[in-house]
Amino acid sequence: MASVLGVLERRERVALARAEELRAELERLQAAVAEAEEAARRAVIAREETVEALAEAADEAAVSEAPTAAVPVAVGVGQRVEVPLWREGMGTEVLPPDCARIVALVREDAAGGGEGVRARAMREHLDWPASDAREQAARFRAKRLVERGWLAEGRPGLFRPRTG
């Protein structure tokens, strides 16, 4: 018959071995999480760099165009819309529908005493599906509207009606 102490020592060895197996598994999982986080970080950087590059390309095109020329804004795959430079007396009817709705939302927010509109609210107002890409698209349109004189950006990412 086995002694009580012998049984307890065996249980202890089994528990310690299991704890060591779990530590090894935890280290493997932590490495996998770190790898996935790094991949996500690289994807965010790539997306941000792409948006910046597209904005720079559009800016270069705007500089080379006549002052009243419209700057194309990407809408979706293969689709582009024109955003004309704002001039006195020009109404939102000259804007593409999504851009006109963004301007209307920003004006409505300001009329209600709001501090400005963020891209997420624009995406929701446009009834676009919730995704980072669609939020970036709304932000890109708002920034293009700022560049063309339709809106102002008081603080980064917070869009208000143009002043003056």
Image (cartoon, rainbow, N blue to C red):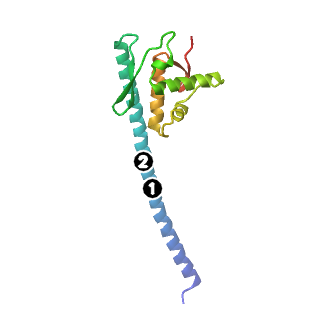
Residue lying farthest right? 113
Local packing at callout 2 (Cα closer than 10 Å; few below 14, some 14-19, many 20+) is few
Which amino acid, by three-letter code, is at mark 2?
Ala
Q: Which residue is mark 2?
A: 36
Residue lying farthest front? 93
Report the residue at 56% width, 78% height from top: 8
Report the residue at 47% width, 25% height from top: 99
Asked if 157 appears above or below 65 in the picture, the reply is: below
Percent position of residue 122, x then y: 53, 31
Q: Look at the image and tell me in which quarter the C terminus lies.
A: top right
> Closer to the camera: disc 1 or disc 2?
2
- Measured in 3D between alpha carbons, the distance from the residue under mark 1 to the one under mark 2, in whole angstroms, is 10 Å
Which amino acid, by three-letter code, is at mark 1?
Leu
Q: Which residue is mark 1?
A: 29
Report the residue at 38% width, 31% height from top: 50
Seen from the viewer's position, the closer of residues 12 and 22 is 22
